[in-house]
Amino acid sequence: MAKTKLKKFAELDTLTNVIQPDCQNISENYHLRGHWSRAFFRNSNPLVLEIGCGKGEYTVSQALECPDKNFIGIDIKGERLWRGAKTSLENDIRNTAFIRVQAQKLEYFFGKDEVSEIWITFPDPQLQKPKIKKRLTSERLLSVYKNILTPEGVVHLKTDNEIFFDYTEELIKASGYNILSICRDIYNNKHKVEPIVTKIMTYYEEKYVNQNIPINYLKFSFK
Ligand SMILES: C[S@@+](CC[C@H](N)C(=O)[O-])C[C@H]1O[C@@H](n2cnc3c(N)ncnc32)[C@H](O)[C@@H]1O
């Protein structure tokens, strides 16, 4: 493994805004489950998750944009999370945290009705048939999101991938969930989405926009 990667892994354990659970011992009794805002952020602000946050630029930028919300970036790749966590600490951004864990394990970390918003930003599309269950909008994960979201909670999806987008739209409709906003090619239709949707770009989003690849957006709830 490259030296810098090893250094980041070692440093991750020392960062106060990073949680790296021991995957073998994850249980529903995780001490912050159900108490994130009060026990970790020391306030009662709404909790927002970014799933597959990569280097966390979006989580960090949203946290700066909305100081009255708490943001948690989730990713399985430690060396990516490291960047967002370091930036937050270096800039004293106190309304962010990062958890290195698979989205499939979210229920162990968040209690029922604990989360107000979920952002799924440029997820790996998992196009091969055997991998469909790994999609971050799979049937199983949707039921996890439904359980941890408040009754008014919403999920936002941003993706460049048409197949992933169509799959999610169809699944939401077939499951009887509620599409609140849908917009293809948001940067040529900015007036059709809330300002926050186009105000901040993720790392991947910026790359795609520079290549003139359309970005699609879906907002849904489970009501
Ligand atoms: C294409 S990158 C997008 C990163 C960032 N959201 C962006 O837009 O720049 C997808 C990210 O999802 C993470 N990821 C993939 N499957 C995941 C899972 N099951 N649980 C948590 N993170 C996952 C990957 O490690 C990767 O960092």
Image (tube, rainbow, N blue to C red):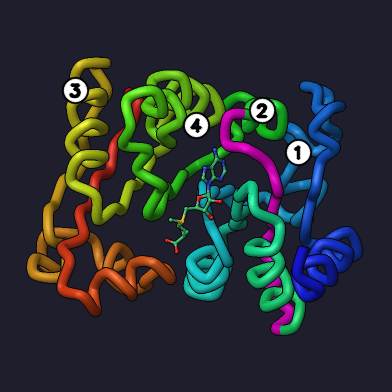
Q: Which residue is mark 1?
A: 35
The span from disc 4 to disc 3 (Cα, nearest Å) is: 20 Å
**Closer mark to the observer between disc 4 and disc 3:** 3
**Horizontal and vertical percent position of residue 134:** 46, 30
Determine the secondary structure under disc 3.
Answer: helix
Magenta-colored span: 91-104
Please tell me in which quadrant of the rendered image residue 108 appears: top right
Q: Which residue is mark 2?
A: 111
Amino acid type of disc 4? Answer: Thr
Q: State which tag comes first along the sequence, 1 or 3.
A: 1
Name the residue located 25 percent from the left edge and 25 percent from the top edge: 172
Q: Which residue is mark 3?
A: 173
Name the residue located 38 percent from the left edge and 66 percent from the top edge: 204
Amino acid type of disc 2? Answer: Gly
Q: Is residue 58 above or below residue 24?
A: below
Determine the secondary structure under disc 2.
Answer: loop
